Image (cartoon, grey):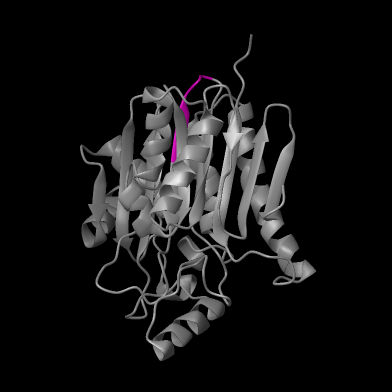
Amino acid sequence: MKQTYALAIHGGCGNVVRGRFNEEQEQAYLKTLQESLRNGQQILEEGESALQAIESAIRILEDSPLFNAGRGSVFTHLGTHEMDASLMDGNRRRAGAVTGVKRLRNPISAARSIMEHSSHVMLAGAGAEAFAEQQGLEFVTPDWLFDQTRWDQYQKALGENRQFMDHASDDQKYGTVGAVALDRHGNLAAGSSTGGITNKKHGRIGDSPIIGAGTYADNATCAISCTGEGEYFIRDVTAHRVSALMEYAGNNLSEAAANAMKSLEQIGGHGGFIGVDQSGNIVMPFNTQGMFRGSVSEDGKLFVKMYEEV
């Protein structure tokens, strides 16, 4: 019997409500989510790895200015970009991550290169970029990363002397991106990529590049990618918590996801995550008003949504 496959993606969560987007904007978001899913689905259909499907799906989201990752990354307090990403292989629990990179087109590819071609898990800033250059990865100029809407958000944040979380501000485009997958070989994987928060200071790092907080995968349990207020996901080790509830408490994926969300809420956290298990079951819980999300499995049914209702 042929092993099933499954793929889920997210593009951030928050104040995603009807009436905030016109039809053209809605279609732009949904079309990009569909493109990401179809790309990853083709890879899985051909029997390639969950890692490859995730990297390819996330690269499409990173190349879109709609999401806060790669090309759509928000501006820091200094008017620069500092991007983070991580990738984890559930087979041997290998992982790679980058943080604070400024010139990489696709930080998720750098995370994979670190996992596969170095003895480290996380590289930061200039060191991460030097390694990426050695690996032949693509670099871009600040002009390529510039987005007028993101710049306007930055100017507003400076004027109000505050920071904007993607999911909280009324005038934001929303964005941390991620993917989880099960491939035909029974392997799970997860990845996340982000530009952080608008007007962030002092080299702030959120949950997206931190294994166990924003990203986690273990073939024995599940694969998870998170989005939301990163500080809370770090404190609650949310991605690993889902896996631990399955391994040690005997929860199934749905139960573990619900219990992990309760734990996050108990400390005041807002956000969501996507997850998949060995049977191809998918969860997409969130406690905000909406989440850009989608999934596809071997039955060919493709699902993309923005708003709270399923």
Q: As drawn, which residue projects farthest toward the front?
A: 266
Tell me the residue at 51%/69% (across/down): 168
The correct choice, above or below, for 28 with respect to 245 in the image is below
Would residue 135 be found to the left or right of residue 258 on screen? left
The correct choice, above or below, for 80 with respect to 82 in the image is below
Residue 45 place in picture, x, y as percent? 64, 28
The correct choice, above or below, for 33 with respect to 20 in the image is above
Closer to us: 195 or 102: 195
Q: As drawn, which residue projects farthest toward the right?
A: 23
Tell me the residue at 43%/83% (across/down): 157
Residue 31 place in picture, x, y as percent? 71, 55
Residue 212 place in picture, x, y as percent? 34, 41
Instruction: Report the magenta residues as a range.
Output: 185-190
Q: In the rendered picture of this protein, how many numbered marks are placed on residues?
A: 0
Tell me the residue at 42%/66% (across/down): 140
Q: As drawn, which residue projects farthest toward the bottom?
A: 159
Would residue 299 be found to the left or right of residue 149 on screen? right
Report if residue 10 is visible in the image. Answer: yes
Quadrant for the N terminus in the image: top right
Q: Quadrant of residue 267?
A: bottom left
Closer to us: 111 or 272: 272
Assess whether residue 259 is covered by the magenta stretch. no
Residue 79 place in picture, x, y as percent? 37, 80
Report if residue 180 is visible in the image. Answer: no
Closer to us: 123 or 263: 263
